[in-house]
Amino acid sequence: MIKKILNVVYGILLALLVALAVMLAASILPIPGNYRVLSVLSGSMEPAIHTGSVVIVAPAEDYKIGEVITFGEISKTKTPTTHRINDIKVVNDKPVYITKGDANNAPDNKEVAASEVKGKVLFSIPYLGFALNFVKQPIGFALVIIVPAILIIWEEAKKIFHEITRGKKKAAVVEIDEKQDDKNV
């Protein structure tokens, strides 16, 4: 019974680690279609998008009032913003977006040029961003690499030990059989 429980826990842990590794890769590597996986770090879009959520963002041909977009620079030191389009102006034949976080009382001070928009939010996954941000840290990244490696080594060591033990038992049985044959002769 305990062995079954440990196997279930092992499976769940392994599945979580694989999911985190996939999310990490998706947030770092380019995905065909220019999809991006980003974390929401503030509560400005609550309750629509919770702090710590992961948002999946994809570029669109045009953006409409009411859509949630992600804009701004994406780098190790700069985090993009995810807010709802509150109004649209046209300046020099190009759209300029006035955005506002759902939890904010007033629109953002800075207007957003179309060139700054990374895409619109397709959907969000609550609270997964906390785990994703942890995995992006050195200790989290190490855990995603080291823990699965330890689990794989442990499983292989158990198999090797089992085979060695089984081989010794077979050798002992063969030796006993040979002694019996010697006595019978």
Image: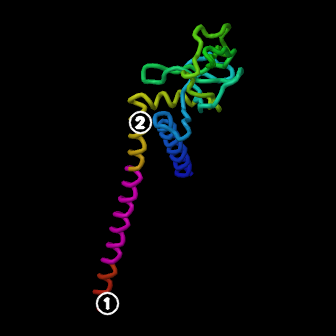
Q: Tell me if residue 9 comes above or below residue 111 in the rendering.
A: below
Residue 14 point in image, percent of width and height? 50, 45
- Decide: few, some or many residues near mark 1? Use Cα within 10 Å; few <14, some 14-19, many ≥20: few
- Which of the two residues, 68 or 1, is positioned nearer the viewer here? 68
Start and end of the magenta stretch?
A: 153-175
Q: Residue 3's x, y, as percent?
A: 52, 51
Q: Residue shown at 37%/50% (left/top)? A: 153
Disc 1 on helix, strand or loop? helix
Which quadrant holds residue 177?
bottom left
Q: Is residue 154 left or right of residue 95?
A: left
What separation in Å lies between label 2 and label 1 (alpha carbons)? 61 Å
Q: Is residue 153 left or right of residue 110?
A: left
Q: Residues within 10 Å of mark 2 (few under 14, many from 20)?
A: some
From this viewpoint, which residue is outermost toward the front? Answer: 92
Q: Residue at 36% x, 59% y: name it.
A: 160
Amino acid type assigned to the residue bearing label 2 in the image: Leu
Who's the residue at 62% across and 14% down the image?
91
User: Residue 22: percent from the left, percent from the top?
Assistant: 50, 41
Residue 183, picture quadrant: bottom left
Identify the residue under disc 2: 143
- For discs 2 and 1, the disc positioned in front in the rendered view: 2
Task: Pick whichever, 124 or 78, lies toward us.
Answer: 78
Residue drawn at x 47%, y 39% is: 21
Tell me, yes or no, whether the highlighted magenta stretch contains residue 82. Answer: no
The residue carrying mark 1 is 184
Under mark 1, the amino acid is Asn
Instruction: Specify the principal SS of the magenta part.
Output: helix
Residue nearest the observer in this picture, 93 or 100:
93
